[in-house]
Structure formats: structure tokens, C-alpha cells
Amino acid sequence: MQDKMNQASLFQVKNLTVEYHSGDSIIHAVSGVSFDLQPGETLGLVGETGAGKTTIARASLRILPEYSVERVDGEILYNGEDILKMNDAQLRKLRGEHISMIFQDPMTALNPVKTVMSQIAEGYKEHHKCTQAEANRRAIEMLEMVGIGADRANEYPHQFSGGMKQRVVIALALACSPKVLIADEPTTALDVTIQAQVLDLIKGLRNELGTAMILITHDLGIVADVCDKVCVIYAGRIVESGTKEDIFDHPTHPYTQGLFAALPDLEHDVPRLKPIEGLPPDPSQERRFCDFLDRCPHRCRACKAFAKDSMIEVSPGHYSRCWRTGSEEA
């Protein structure tokens, strides 16, 4: 799959591997992840908690916790330049101006002792070398763009509700009109009404600014509403990838099928939902076989003979990490 990536892609991740150390153990958080992103395109990273989605996002901006990272390998390319090889000055220019991130928890993403206007203006002033007055005007403009009036610009984060804080974080991320936006579960802990408003806001800004986006979520409804392409992540690997239509209409990996089977169906009355049995594998243990083997309802002896690093092309651009995908027997 990696060889077939468009070399003109705006953003590419190639064979990314991230390991942490915890005591005497090595945690295999991300293993051999590859995907690409075109201008204006939205890619959804979907999977259970602990699958490695946020690690992929933080690696893309080189903001992984240095005290616990054991190894980072692979390539993360922005306009052909490897982010993993950039120096500090290059990274400072990249973050915010070219690639921004909406962090999962707005409560911890904002500085509690600075006004929301000053936090947005700070980054804009740093990247554009403008006056403080110009930076403040841009900050107010961004707050108004996300539906917060100028009269609230000098207020502090604790004076805003959870949904309003999330809007401030979005304004902060988009202040410099980045080419790539990474949104790490931007609607977590928000009620459904605010979720819909935040998603509409993100889609509107994406269309207005032409920003490419990586959306991290475990909510398939959000993926259906926002994304163009999808990568399903399990135990630090992509187990299935393709367009939104490929994944929703023709899921082929047993894990992807299990995710859809666990969703409530309003057209059928069932006594219980069908969960995926078992737990994800221990990330500190090297796995010789398929990561999903112990939980898979279709497991058999042939699964142990299938190379776990192999991806089978189901249809053009649609890949699955399961031997049954290309098997007539299956």
C-alpha cells in the first residue's frame, strides 16, 4: 500500500513505529502505520481506546513525551519534508502555521491564567511577526468565526462552558490558517447538541479554508458525517483502510465488521447489542500472529500462517489485514 501512495500528497505517514518504555517493559504503541492525505481531504482514524490513534497524532507534530518514548521510526512527510528530521526552528515554524492540533480535552489545552484572546494572539504574533494590536484583531476575528462574541475575548477559560472552550481551542488551532488540522476527538464529553454544532463548525471552516484534516474518533457516526477516507486502527496497526464508502458499505476485516455489529440498528429490534468479545492484546508483548486472533470469531489454523504485516487489496484503494479477504474459501 505504501508504494502506491500519491507522491504529491500534502501529508504522508510511512511505516510509522512508536514504542514507549514502562519500567522494564517496551510498549509497542504504533507498528508500521502508513497513510496519506490530500489538500482539503478528511481522514478518519477509528478504533478503541488505547489503539494508538493519539500517539500517531502527537508523533505527527513531534510532541510525544520524551521521558517515556523508547523509539520512533518511519517517515512523516509534509510537502515532502520529513518532520522526524526537522530541527527545533523548523518545528516551531511548522506547528500552528502549517499543522495544528485540536486537543482532546479543552480543559487542559487552555492556559487558565491567560485570557482566550491572548492565547490565540500569541501564536499568531509569533508566526506572522506582527504587532500586538494586529494579533489581537486576528484573535477576535477567529473567536467571532467560531461563534464567540468580541465582548468575551478578555475572559478566562473558566468563564466558558465545555462547548465554548472547545470552540476556543478550534479558533486557536485555526488562527494561522494551517494546511493540516489534526482533531483528536473534538466532540468528547460534549452533549449531542453541542457535538452537532462543533462538527458543523469544523466542516464549514474546512470548506472555507481548504484545510486537510485528520479526525481521531471512536464514533462511526461522526466518521460518516465528516470523513472522506477511513483507517481502522487496532492494537497500533491499520487493519483496514479505504474510502468512507468502502468501509461502511463493504467492511471486510473481522474487527471492522465487529465495530458495525456493535452499533444499534433502528430498523431491527434486538434484545442485546453484539459486543466484540475479549480485550485488546497486551501492548508490551510481541505478537507473532494476527493482533485480532484471540477475539476473532473466524479464527482458524490458517490465521497463524498469514503474515501479520501483509495488507490485501480488496478493491482499488481498499485494503484489509486479513487472509480471508482474498480467499475463495472464506
Image (spheres, helix red, strand yellow):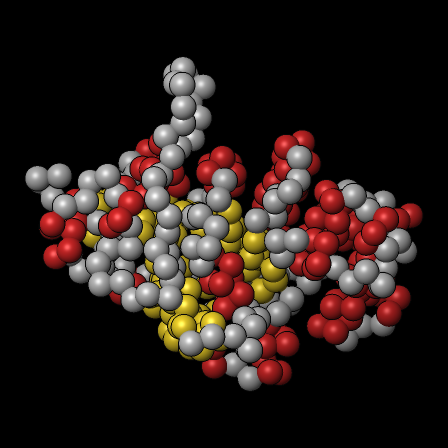
Question: Compared with residue 181, is residue 58 higher up or lower down, i.e. above or below?
Answer: below
Q: In which quarter of the image is residue 195?
A: top right
**27 or 46: nearer the viewer:** 27
Figure quadrant of the C terminus:
top left
Left or right relative to 229: residue 213: right
Q: Residue 71: where, in percent of width, then height?
A: 42, 77
Q: State the image quarter where residue 118 is shown.
A: bottom right
Q: Quadrant of the N terminus?
A: bottom left
Residue 4 image-quadrant placement: bottom left
Tell me if residue 221 can be seen.
yes
Q: Which residue lies most toward the left here?
A: 329
Residue 99 x, y percent position in the rendering: 58, 64
Closer to the camera, 152 or 276? 276
Q: How far across and how far down the image is residue 283, in percent?
A: 38, 62
Q: Which residue is located at x 78 percent, y 43 percent?
A: 161
**Can residue 7 be spotted in the picture?**
no
Q: Residue 145, image x and y in percent?
A: 75, 47
**Rendered view: 279 above or below 265:** below
- The tally of labels here is 0
The answer to whether 255 is drawn above or below residue 37 in the figure is above
At x 35% / y 44%, what residue is drawn?
A: 278
Judge from the rendering whether residue 183 lies leftward or rightward of residue 116; answer left or right: left
**Does 317 sit left or right of 187 as displayed?**
left
Q: Residue at x 91, y 48 (%)?
A: 151
